[in-house]
Every structure is written in structure tokens, then in C-alpha cells.
Amino acid sequence: MSVRVALHSRSFLERGLLLLVILIFLEGTVLTLGAASSPDISAQDNTGGHDHLDDHRGIAGSHVHPNYTKKAFPVLSLDYHHIQVPFEISLWVLLASLMKLGFHLIPQLSSIVPESCLLIVVGLLVGGLIKLAGEEVPPVLDSNLFFLCLLPPIILDAGYFLPIRPFMENIGTILMFAVVGTLWNAFFVGGLLYAVCQIEGTYLSQVELLPCLLFGSIISAVDPVAVLAVFEEIHINELLHILVFGESLLNDAVTVVLYHLFEEYSGAGEVTPMDVVLGVICFLIVSLGGIAVGAIYGILAAFTSRFTSHTRVIEPLFVFVYSYMAYLSAEMFHLSGIMALIACGAVMRPYVEANISHKSHTTVKYFLKMWSSVSETLIFIFLGVATVAGPHAWNWTFVSVTVILCLVSRVIGVVGLTFIINKFRIVKLTTKDQFIVAYGGLRGAIAFSLGYLLDKNLFPMRTMFLTAIITEIFFTVFVQGMTIKPLVDLLAVKKKQEAKRSINEEIHTQFLDHLLTGIEDICGHYGHHHWKDKLNRFNKKYIKKCLIAGERYKEPQLIAFYHKMEFKQAIELVESGGGVKLPSAVPSQVSMQNIQPKKLPPPVAERALPQFTKGREEEIRKILRSNLQKTRQRLRSYNRHTLVADPFEDGWNDFILKKQRLIELEKKVRLMSNYLTVPGATPDSPTMCRARLASDPNAFYNIKASSDGVPTIQVDLASPQSPDSVNMLNEFSKRGATGQGLGQREGADRDEDQGLMMKPAGKGEKGEEEGGNKNPGLMRCLSDPGPSNEDEEDEPFLP
Amino acid sequence: MGTLQSLSDEPEYRELAEKTGFSFEQIGILHKRFKQLSHNENTLRRADLDTIPDLACNPIRTQIIEAFFDKRNFHQNGDGTVEEISFEEFLVVMSHFRPPALNMTEEQREKVRREKLRFLFNMHNTDNDGTITLEEYRHVVEELLSRSGALGKETAKGIADAAMLEVASISMGHMEPDEFYEGITFEHFLKILKDIEIETRMNIRFLNMDTTTLCNRDSSSIR
């Protein structure tokens, strides 16, 4: 208890210190940035720099300047201009990251206020400080910077980890919301705004119809960045999340087309029906073209990853570069870059994941999460800074009407569309769902950047538009963002299910798929199960062969899922110190012997039944330990496809050793938790170990032998030709064993392993007290504190 | 496709609609298909279903075909299998894949869920002893992986074992080491699959469309 109090006070002190550091840093940052943007100082630095440069040259060469007056040799000089741009960028990134750190140190704050709000406030502060310092606020949310650097990482992260199955199942609904909903919003807001502007007394009559419609189209698009930022924290159920998020991604095409259409013709002042038709065609080209571009790059990336088995270190690079190029290529043709990026990520993922090593996969995941996180933070901070930067033209009528109209149109749009959509859906959207979808339509930085892009000359009311956009963004992010969490709780909306996907569910999902396809075939109806099945088969037959290296393309989905699950559980078990704290949701006390049929080969069964005294155990232990090495060697020859258990004797050795360790640890562990390690009859996969671990230790004495059907886990970390599997093993072994239950191999020759073999073995004293004595090295290697959405990885390769 | 009037004239259709909950139009379409499959006879045989080309690549086609001839699915508390089925029995089996109606109470939804899961359970529980034993479950997984050749067999065992253990863990909680878990009973089956939302997934869309469009026209077709 006292330890905890001490820890608390320490962490409090730490927090205070960190905040202080952040504040000081902020000041320094602000002043530097402010100073840097001022032209005078930079000019001074410039000339100063040049002087030094000349001095150097003068000394090195034999020239002597005619007016050269000898000064003292400059021992230390300041040349800010030389590194100005990278330095500023780094400072901003550092500021963003420190802010992110800071917020999570204050849990009370981050639970009430969503991160995006806090970041905007920080941006406001920074902008304010810069202004106070008298410097000009740098135009940070420059559209080029935003669209080319800040937005792609977020979208790629979203696209790569997009849960394909729910997305495809709801694609009709999502498209309806994205296309029809956005169109409705744009015209409703634009039209009514124009009507309001025409009213006398608002001094807005110079605002024409087309600029109003343009404004409507800018402000009506739901923003993926804001939606992601807010929805990630409320953990809403998958359906709603994918609906709102999918809509925010797919409405980009509509926004692009509308924006260009109205921008083009604002000059002309009118839009003919011909233009509308062209607009529709343009929309189709923009969206389908974007997807096509993305898919092409995705396939290229997948194909490239097939050959990377010898250069594993640059594998992640291919993922990033191909995706970015897809985005840029789409932007080049004014196609929808966001859709290209999503298509690229979604297309390449199943094949790339099958090809790249486990480490590369982790790298890709972490880099994407890191970049998208930093980008998101920066975007919000910049929003705050840009708000302070102005210029603003506040018009009460315009702004308030905008805010109200946006809300109203969103609600009407969602309700109306749901009414139509529910006729075609099996799972209808309830009122609660509709409310969340409507309320979750947040606007964000994309709207601002689009507004920023407007030409000042063509649109004299640009500043007023920008002010209105910013107000709308603030309103949605602050008001809606802050209140959505309590509302979700209040309305008791279904939350994301934390339970892991069980193997039973996976089996039955597959079974259902085949069953429904079969029934459809019997009916003679070519429903979407039929087409999905056809696509899967086509994929398996032709595409996978081309794009997946080695033999892995033959691996069926269920087996892949099983391997993944086993591996995950093995890692968890190892991480948790071998069973002291089980991640299992189910405190099960059932072990393998309970489900094995009783009809076992008699000699095997008989061996197990006698009760052992401690002395006898020691004997057996000694005898069997001598066989241990031999056993190990035998096991190593299994390849990854062999999930057959060892012959009974081998398991017996490990079983005895485990028991020895158990007895030692039992005393310590018993205090900690209800879960105790109990060895089974044979080494099993972590699934079974997990169940077994919870069993009563007394059960040991009445162990029944298990049949031959108990598998051992052989997990391959990478395809057989990769050296990574060996490396990982070496890392494991170097850092020593972890925990009971599953541990490391300590044998001498582990180098020719084909995969990571989890065997209950190794040393054992780890992981006892408090689950705390875990090997930090291994923890670092294995622990995964990072991004929340682990579930995407559980998705099978192809739906 | 005949008009609604001519179909509703046939009293048998009315009876079938009452029994299975399909609309007249749906029954008409399915009857056509039935006739097509059975070559205009009144009964359908296994061989007829075998001839469907698309079904050939389905890994669990034997189970699917068996399900049509399984008396347990005829809602008549029968047992065992038959060699040929009539249109009525065909419809009854098909009715398991009807989506739940729009406004259903919680109990009705539960009932639908149980019915669908009972269908699945019967498909697995081939010897009709009330439980899915380990062997039967292994068989299921093997069939699912039957397209993967040799490696499937080995892995199938492992997967089935792991799955079985999971069911046991979830359903039984604590078990003494000498207790033996006989197999998955229907209640346990319900429990482990309760997250799958079967009533929304085990549906054929084709039938769904017709129900909704006919909702307004003929209220007598809705149960």
C-alpha cells in the first residue's frame, strides 16, 4: 500500500516537472518560431552567415580581399538561417508530441475533453503567444503542406487497417450517406444561405449563389480526421464506427467534384445543365479513377513484396512509398487522392502481410500509427494557430446561420436517408444509431484547407467564409466532440465488444459463408454470397499465386487465423510472465483432459493414473531429464505445418519439469491470483495452456493422459525462408527465459529452427512476484502498448 | 411469374405461406426452382442436388445436401433421414434462412435465433445424440479445410481441439480433472455463438427483398 502511495507522489512530481518543462519549451519554441518568421532577423543571419563563409574561404585560399580587416577567428557562431526550415519543422513536431505526452499525464482531463479539443486550445495558445511576442504568425496550415504532408499518413493508416468485412457489408449504406448525404448537405446549406443572404439588412447581398453553393460544398463534408480523433475515444460499436468513418472517407470524391465545379463556374456566374451532366461524369471518373489508381499501386506493392525475402529491412518502405505515390498520382489528375490511398492500402494488405516478415509488419503498423498520430496532433494545433492568425471577418448572421443550417441539414439528411436505406438493410438502423451518425458528423481541417485554397480575387468574401468554417469546426469539435461521449453512455449505445474473436466464431463464420453460398446455389439465386465466394476462389486461384511468395498462398484462411491466434496467445502468455495474470476473459478451469474421449490406449492411460509421491517424482525427473535433450532434438525437425503432438514420452519430460517449477512457484503465486499453472499431460498450444493454467493444482495428481490429438504449437514468425524467425528466437534466448508455462528453449542448437517453438521448458523462476519480475528486455521486445485497435489484425486476410 | 391473384388461388400455397412465413411470390419462385431441380417431378432426391454445378466447389456440400434430407429440419419432431423430399419439406428447410421480420419482439427474435442455431446444430450433430462430440466437431473442421489437402487434416485436429476446449471452458467453468466433457449440447452451442448475431447473418437476401416489397401489398403473408 505504502509503495503505491510513494509511487503516486513520485509520479505526481514527475508530472509536474514534465509540465513545467513543456511550458518552458513552449515559450522557447514560440519565441524562436516567431523570431524566425520575422524577415529582419533572418536577413541579419543571412549576411552574418555569409560573412563567416567568406572568412573561411579567405583563410583557406590565398585570396586576400582588398577591404579585408582581420577579425578574431570566430570560435563560435550562430547560423540560424542555415538550418531554419528543418529546425522549425522539428520544433513543431516536438511540440505536438510533447503535448500528446502531457495530456495523458492528466487522466481526468483527457477523459472529459477529447484530445482534439485540447490540441486546438494549445494551438490557440501558441498562436496567441506568437502574436503577443509581436511576431507574425506563420501560415502553418498552408494547403500544400496539409494536403501533401499532413493528410496522407492519417488516410493511409485508416485505409491499411480498414476492417474490410464490415466495410463491404455496409458499403451500400456508406455510399448512400457519402454521396447522397453530402450532396443534400451541400445544396441545402448553400441554397438556404443564399436565401438568407438575400434578406435585407444582413449586408450580405453581394454574396452570389455559386459562391454560396461552393461554401456549402466545402462545409458539408464530414471530416475523417476529426471523426477518427473523436470516435477512437468513445469506443462505439463497429457498425456505427464504420458507417460514419466510411462516409467521411468516401465523401472526398463528392467534395472534390463539387468544389472544382463551383470554383470553375463562379467566375462565369452560372451553371448550365450541360455542366451538371459533366459534373456527374466527372464524379464517376474521380471516384472510380481514384480507386483504380490506388488498386494498381496496391498490386504493384504486393508484387514487389513477393521478392523482398532477402532484403527484409526495406520492406516497410515499399508499403509507404507505393501508397504515397498512389496518392500523389491521383492528386496529379485531380482524382480523389483519399480514395486512391484507401484502395491502395486495402488491396495490398492481404498480400503484403502474407509476404513480409513479422518484424516488418510490426514496423509498418507502428510507423503508420506514429505518423498518423503526429499528423493528427499537428493538424489540430495548426488549426488553433491558424485561427489566431486570421484574418477574420466576423458576420453574426452568416456564421450563426451556417452553424444552425449544418446541424439541421445533417439531421434531416441522416433521418431521410435512413428511412430509405432501412428498406434494403437486414439490420435496420435504429433511432439511436441515426442520432449517433448525425451527431458524429464532425467537420475538420479539410474544410479549412479547402477554404484556404480559394482565390482571394475571385472570392472577396473569402475571409468571411474562413471565419464561418472555423466557427463550424470549433463548434463540431468542441461541442459535439465533448458531448458525444456522455450521450453515448446516456443512450446506452452498444459499445465495441472487447472480447477477442474466438476460434469457434471463426469456424462458424466460415461455415456460414459456405452454407449460405450453397443455399444460394440451390435456390439458383446469384446473391452476393455467390459473388463473394467466386471472388474468393478467383483470388485464391490466380491472384494469390502471383502475389504471395513461396508456398503460403495455399494456406486457407482458417488455418491462418488459427496460427495468428496461437501466436498471439503465446506472446501474451510469455509477456505476462507465464500465467500469473492471464489475459483471458474466461477464468476457465477446464483442461485438455476434460475433453479428450475416454477411450485411450490403455498403457498410456495406466501410466498416468498412479499417484505420485514427491520422492518418486524426483526419481522420475532425474531419469527423464537425461532424455530431455534427445526429445528436444526430435521435436525440432517438425515444420510449421505439423501441429501434431509429440509422442507421449516427450510430453512427460516437460510435464515433470513443469511440475518441479510449479511447486516452487506455487507458494509465491498463490497469493497473487486465482490462476495457477498446472501442467497438462502434454505440452499444448497456448489455447489449451491458457485453460489449463487456471486449473486446480491438485489436479496434477490425477492426470489422465491425453491422446495423441493434443497439438503442440509450432508458430512460424515468418515464412520459412526468412532468417527473422531465428533472430527472434535468439533474442528470446539471450534475454533469458520468461515465466512458467511457456518459456524459452535453452537447448544449444536452436539456430536451425524453422520457427518459434513454444515448449514448456526453460528456466522457471521468472514471473513470480506481482507478475513484476518480467524480463524488461523481453517486455520491450514483445510488449505492445501502442495503438488501440488491435482488432483489425484479427481480421482474416480476405473476408 | 404469375400474378398474385392466380397464386393465392392455390389453397396449398396459402397453407404453405402460413406454415413457413414466405410470401406467395417467394413460394412461386421457389416452386419453379424445385421443379427445375427435380426435373418436374414431385419429389427431390440427393442426386438432383448433386447436379448443381456451383455446388461442386463448396467444401461442405455433403452437409448442406444432407440437411435437406434430415427429418429433424422438417419441424415435425421426426428423426433420421429420408431419401426424397416434397416441395413442402423443401420450403420448410428453406424457411430457416428467412430473415426476421421488421418488428419483432425480443422473444420472437430469440425464437428465430434458436431456430437457426438449431439448424446449424443439426448439421453438426450427425448422430443425433443431442451433443456435438469431439469427433463430430473434428469432422466439421476437416470438411471446411478439405480443400487444402494433406496439411488440412493435421491442422484440423488441432483447431477442433482448441475450439472444443474453448467451448468447454466457456460453458462448464470449472471441471474436475476426471470429469469428461461429453460434447457440445445445444445450450452450450447457443452460448458460444451468441455474439455472432445469427439472426442477422444467416439469411438469404433474395428472400429478404421480396418480403419487404410485399409487406404493403399482402399483409396476410406476414406472420
Image: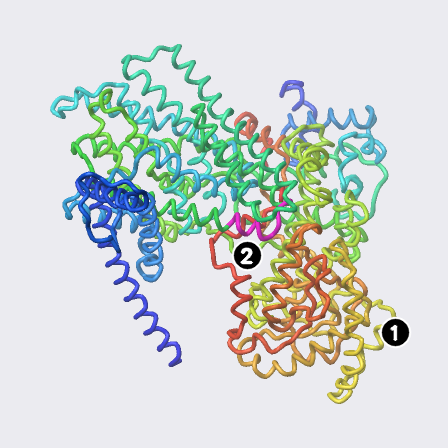
Residue A426 lies in magenta, yes or no?
no
* Amino acid type assigned to the residue bearing label 1 in the image: Pro
What's the chain of the residue with tag 1? A
Measuring from the top left, give residue A798's x and y in whole percent.
Answer: 63, 41
At x 57%, y 45%, the residue is A315
Measuring from the top left, give residue A252's x and y in whole percent.
Answer: 42, 30
Q: Distance of mark 1 from mark 2, alpha carbons?
A: 41 Å
Reply above or below: B29 against B160. above
Measuring from the top left, give residue A218's x and y in whole percent.
Answer: 32, 29
Residue at the bottom extreme of this rendering: A615
Given residues A587 and B92, the one toward you in this image is: A587
Q: Are marks 1 and 2 on the same chain?
A: yes
* Amino acid type assigned to the residue bearing label 2 in the image: Ala
Q: Secondary structure at mark 1?
A: helix
Q: Which residue is mark 1?
A: A603
At x 23%, y 18%, the residue is A208
Residue B43, quarter of picture = top right
Give the residues in magenta: A355-365
Given residues A167 and A655, the one toward you in this image is: A655
Q: Secondary structure at mark 2?
A: loop
Q: Which residue is mark 2?
A: A499
Residue at the left extreme of this rendering: A201
What's the chain of the residue with tag 2? A
Measuring from the top left, give residue B210's x and y in whole percent.
Answer: 60, 28
**Whether residue A371 is visible:** yes
Residue A357 lies in magenta, yes or no?
yes
The number of discs equals 2
